[in-house]
Amino acid sequence: MTSFTEKIYSATRKIPSGKVATYAQIARMIGRPRASRAVGNALDKNPHSYLVKGLPSRQRVPCHRVVRSDGSLGGFASGAKKKQAILAKEGVVVSGGKIDLKRYLYR
DNA sequence: CTAATGACCATTA
DNA sequence: ATAATGGCCATTA
């Protein structure tokens, strides 16, 4: 575990249910404004599934709340379809493959 | 050490 | 609107 990935997980955990953040945003939060791509890599390797019950909240990383800057979903280890389903359950509407960032972006 | 690899981004055409 | 392009950067081989 590198400090880089730990910071990413920490930042990602701050995103509340019903909101989303972009990879670039996470990158900015941890002080590496140009590392958005590396952020995606780190989240990809994240083994902590959001859906696992009983997992301590400190270990849960809601990586499904991280999307692309253009509002499209971006990737997901278990499939983008799954990602969308979880978001929908939290109240984030994905229409036409895009999310209305004006409404759901975490500020 | 170098090279390749992406859950990316902004710009340009 | 989509597609290509060049840049970016931590991690891994």
Image: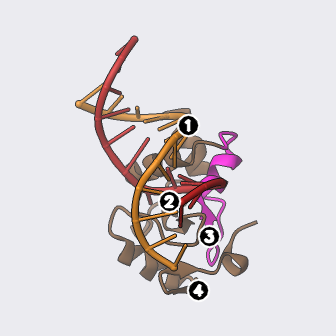
Chain colours: A brown, B red, C orange
For the residue pair A60 and A95, the one nearer the viewer reads as A95
Q: How many angstroms separate mark 2 from mark 4 (CA)?
A: 19 Å
- Count of numbered tags: 4
In the drawing, does residue A25 fall left or right of residue C13?
right
Label 1 vs label 3: CA separation?
21 Å
Residue A1 seen in the figure: no
Asked whether A14 or A28 is in front, the reply is: A28
Question: What chain is tagged by disc 3?
Answer: A
Residue C10 vs A16, above or below: the answer is above
Q: Which residue is disc 4 drawn over?
A: A91
- Mark closer to the observer (3, 2): 3
Position of residue A94 relative to residue A74, above or below, is below
Which residue position is annotated with label 1?
Answer: A4
Instruction: Tell me the crowding category of disc 4: few under 14, some 14 to 19, or many 20 or more residues within 10 angstroms, Cα based.
Output: few
| Residue at screen point 51% across, 85% down | A88
Q: Residues within 10 Å of mark 3 (few under 14, many from 20)?
A: many
